[in-house]
Amino acid sequence: MAYCSSRFERQAKADGYLYVAGLDEAGRGCLFGPVFAGAVILDPQKPIRGLDDSKVLAEAERERLFDLIQARAIAWSAARAEASEIDQINIYQASRLAMKRALEALAPQPDYLLVDALRLDTPIEQKPLIHGDARSRSIAAASIVAKVSRDRIMATYEARYPGYGLARHKGYATPEHRRTLTQLGPTPEHRLSFMPVRIAAGLGPAQTNLAFDGLERLEVACP
């Protein structure tokens, strides 16, 4: 079984790299709002215990770890790609775009990347890791930054669009969200390229972002 450790970071350091950054996203399977990405360069001299895939951590633990990441990391950043961008370029490319923005916001810039499950368009040396947020502490830290940053803005959307329960389900395709989406219709922040939103908008399933079908099975219940 995969376990979260610093072995990939240690190997990169042994190969001569100085700043190793982990990158991950949050909200890829949501029906509503932006997809967020986090980027983190951990400081090996200031270890943080308990880092793991954000999806397996309780909300209070994610918040606690996010505070520690802010205090102890060499650098961290969070960035987003909006729902309109997701609809224009698809969720996969929007996730990559959010990660690229998070990477560009880091100071200092890393010279090696550990990326969860995909490859970025950058000359920086990188290693994509399947289930990286459960295997690499840097990617786990990035997943926490992305998840907490995204969850925190849902409260502002809850006030802007009352009745959808956004503060509870965070925009994921829960039964509650699907029900209110059918009853109230989509907001301007819903992803019209995702099938349930298109159907609720009366647009039908044609030209749907089919990537949602696979993501739904993986992320439908990850608030």
Image: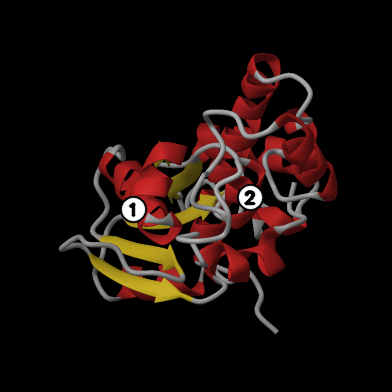
Q: Is residue 125 above or below residue 150?
A: below
**Height in image: 112 above or below 66?**
below
Q: Is residue 27 above or below residue 189?
A: below
Nearer to me, 14 or 121: 121
Mark 2 highlights which residue? 199
Left or right side of 7 for 160: right
- Mark 2 closeness class: few <14, some 14–19, many ≥20 residues within 10 Å: some
Please tell me which residue is depicted at 50% across the width and 59% down the height of the picture: 208
**Label at residue 196:** none
- Between 73 and 194, the one nearer to me in the picture: 194
- Going by the image, does 179 lie left or right of 85? right
Q: From where the camera sits, is residue 65 visible? A: yes
Query: What is the count of numbered marks?
Result: 2
Indicate the quadrant where residue 146 lies. top right
Which residue is at the far top? 159
Secondary structure of the residue carrying tag 2 is helix
Q: How far apart in space, not on screen, are marks 1 and 2 (Cα)?
A: 20 Å
Q: Quadrant of the N terminus?
A: bottom right
Q: What's under tag 2, amino acid-wise?
A: Ile
**Crowding near the residue tagged with mark 1, few <14, some 14–19, many ≥20 C-alpha atoms within 10 Å:** some
Disc 1 target residue: 89
Q: Residue 10: x, y in percent?
A: 42, 70
For mark 1, give the secondary structure: helix
Looking at this view, is 142 or 188 the one in front? 188
Q: Residue at x 55, y 53 (%)?
A: 194
The amino acid sitting under disc 1 is Ile
Q: Confirm or deny contact between disc 1 and disc 2 (CB under 8 A).
A: no
> Residue at coordinates 30% horizontally, 55% vertically from top-left?
19
